[in-house]
Amino acid sequence: MSQKKKRSLTGLKPTGNLHLGNYLGALRPALELSKSYDCIYFIADLHSLTQTRDAQALASQVLDQVATWLAIGLDTDKHILFRQSDVPSVTELTWYLSCVTGHGLLEKAHAFKDAQAKGQEVNMGTFCYPILMAADILLYDTDVVPVGKDQKQHVEMARDMAGSLNAAYGELLVLPEPLIQEEVMLIPGLDGRKMSKSYNNEVPLFCDEKTLRKKLMSLKTDSTGMEEPKALDGSTVGDLFKLFATKAQYDDLSARLAKGGMGWGHAKEELFVAINDHVKEMRERYVACRKDEALLQRELAKGAEKAQAVASQTIKRVRQAVGLR
């Protein structure tokens, strides 16, 4: 008898265009897990409501994300892709977890502390964000959650909340483990900082070739003259190039830059070619899928049905344990 695969869960908020950082840091590693895990992927539309106030944009960005998952090769017959709000049990589990979670734990959340430090007004959705995120994870008996180091806390808090509920009512919830992908920890943006929509330094994943080239040509570099030698290692151009080029291609470009007589503009052009070659076919699939909204809605309906089948088992256990019949 073959051993049951462990379950992995990945969720992304539908806020703005997905960029290369999302692809390299979350989408591609999560998709890679589908080879060895039973994978669930969800579109975190409820989470986006802490900031988003544009209903039409939110609905459109949900479909953008469905098309993106399909374009990069997700097999929705073997794995689950769904919209978070299509499974209402997540908000029910959020309440149960809220009743065993202390105020002090939530005050330790990075997002809350950052908002406070910046003097921002914090709504209750932002403050309780970790509880909803924990419910996302725990509702599906998740074994591993692929995250960056900056998001590890969310999984740890989910474990704390699950432990509290289990301590009160018995072993109801699986304790998840964070799965950190060390090799894609930090994807540099156009200014050298972490690629992020909040920094306005992102490279959209499926922008057209003209826009892609223009974006990459704006990469921040030093002012070393054309004839002078340059170091690819440690540069933003190099950090991005190594993510898309082979080692031989990287070493070749590095050697040519080190000799001098080659400007950063030439290196950026080679970076453009490497990235464009990588995303070209995916971009074409994305454009085709995004035009077929009926297809995208069918995928969401299929995913919701499969996700609800898993969630209903968990929520039934919890309801019975806490005394709700």
Image (spheres, rainbow, N blue to C red):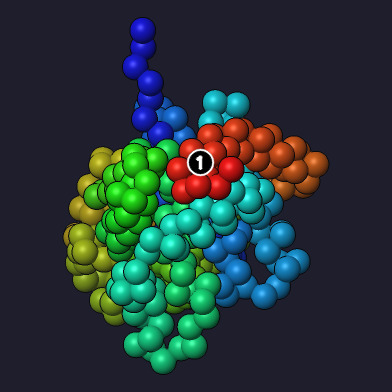
Q: Which residue is mark 1?
A: 320
Tell which of 203 and 169 is nearer to you: 169
Query: As displayed, is residue 228 above or below residue 84?
Result: below
- Residue 206 is situated, as x and y percent measured from the top left of the image, at 58, 53
Residue beneath the point at 46% across and 69% down: 128
Q: Quadrant of the C terminus?
A: top right
Report the residue that reaches farthest toward the top: 1
Residue 295 picture quarter:
top right
User: How far across and how far down the image is residue 171, in percent?
Assistant: 34, 39
- Along the viewing direction, whichever of 199 and 132 lies nearer the viewer: 132
Q: Number of numbered discs present?
A: 1
Q: Can residue 120 be spotted in the picture?
A: yes
Residue occupying image coordinates x 34% and y 80% = 113
Visible residue check, residue 10: no
- Which amino acid, mark 1? Gln
Q: Percent position (x, y) of residue 34?
A: 44, 32
Residue at screen point 51% across, 41% down = 320
Residue found at the far right of this picture: 294
Please tell me which residue lies in front, 155 or 77.
155
Q: Classify mark 1: helix, strand or loop.
A: helix
Quarter holding the N terminus? top left
Residue furthest toward the bottom?
Answer: 119
Camera-nearest residue between 72 and 9? 9
